[in-house]
Image: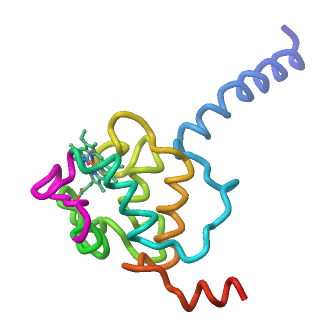
Amino acid sequence: MNRLTCWLSGAALIGLLLPPLVSGAEDCTDLDAIDQQPAVDYENSIQPIFDNQCLACHGPGGQAGLDLSPGASHDNLVKVASSQDATWLRVTPSSLQDSLLFLKVNCNDPPVGSRMPPGGAMADGNQALIRDWIVQGALPEADLLFQDRFEN
Ligand code: HEC
């Protein structure tokens, strides 16, 4: 093998190895193609996701001390520390990267525990609704003033 073919095969090998390493480091569902929904309403858009996919394990006294039942879930999430790692908040209003809830529904390798729900990732559209709700301030109900501004 001369110097050029040696260099070429080396470059090809690096080319083969790099893409899996880069994508493996992220391991989150890409939601960029899903537009933000304006003024996401917690009771009508977020709570039903929990009712359908989470309550089996996260009712009163549920797994990891997390109660996602109607009427209790918002108080159990927003600005509440993870029961497993108090350096994390379950939801930090307006910050996806500081919201364990979002990282656990969006990523295969979240910073605490495993992806939720355990049986497999939730639909991308539902992950995006949770994203939008957090980005919009994780409010207990839709910000109707914001919605008016958006629609007018
Ligand atoms: C089959 C049971 C099961 C289901 C269904 C389930 N979880 Fe979990 N959940 C767990 C267990 C067990 C843990 C603790 C281990 C971990 O964090 O992976 C946990 C932990 C969590 C935590 C971390 C709480 C903390 O304080 O550290 C969040 C957030 C969470 N789940 C959200 C959800 C959401 C949202 C859903 C529905 C989309 C869901 N889970 C569905 C079993 C479940």
Viewer-side residue, 18 vs 56: 56
Residue lying at the far top of the rendered structure? 1
Q: Is residue 64 magenta?
A: yes
**Quadrant into which the N terminus falls:** top right
* Quadrant of the snapshot with the C terminus: bottom right
* Viewer-proximal residue among 44 and 7: 44
Q: Which residues are magenta?
A: 57-71
* Res 65 quadrant in image: bottom left
Between 11 and 45, the one lying in front of the other is 45
Q: Looking at the image, is 146 positioned above or below residue 33?
A: below
Residue 81 found in image quarter: bottom left
Give the residue at x 51% y 72%.
40
Front-lying residue, 1 or 42: 42
For this view, does 149 lie left or right of residue 81? right
Residue 94, placed above or below residue 111:
below
Q: Taking 33 as reference, is 75 above or below it?
A: below
Horizontal and vertical percent position of residue 6 = 81, 17
Residue 94 highlighted magenta (yes or no): no
Residue located at (48% from left, 76% from top): 94
Q: Residue placed at 86% from the left, 18% from the top?
A: 3
Q: Position of residue 101 (x, y in %)?
A: 36, 59
97 displayed left or right of 10: left
Numbered marks: total: 0
* Residue 77 quadrant: bottom left
Q: Residue at x 24, y 74 (%)?
A: 75
Q: Position of residue 115 (x, y in %)?
A: 37, 43
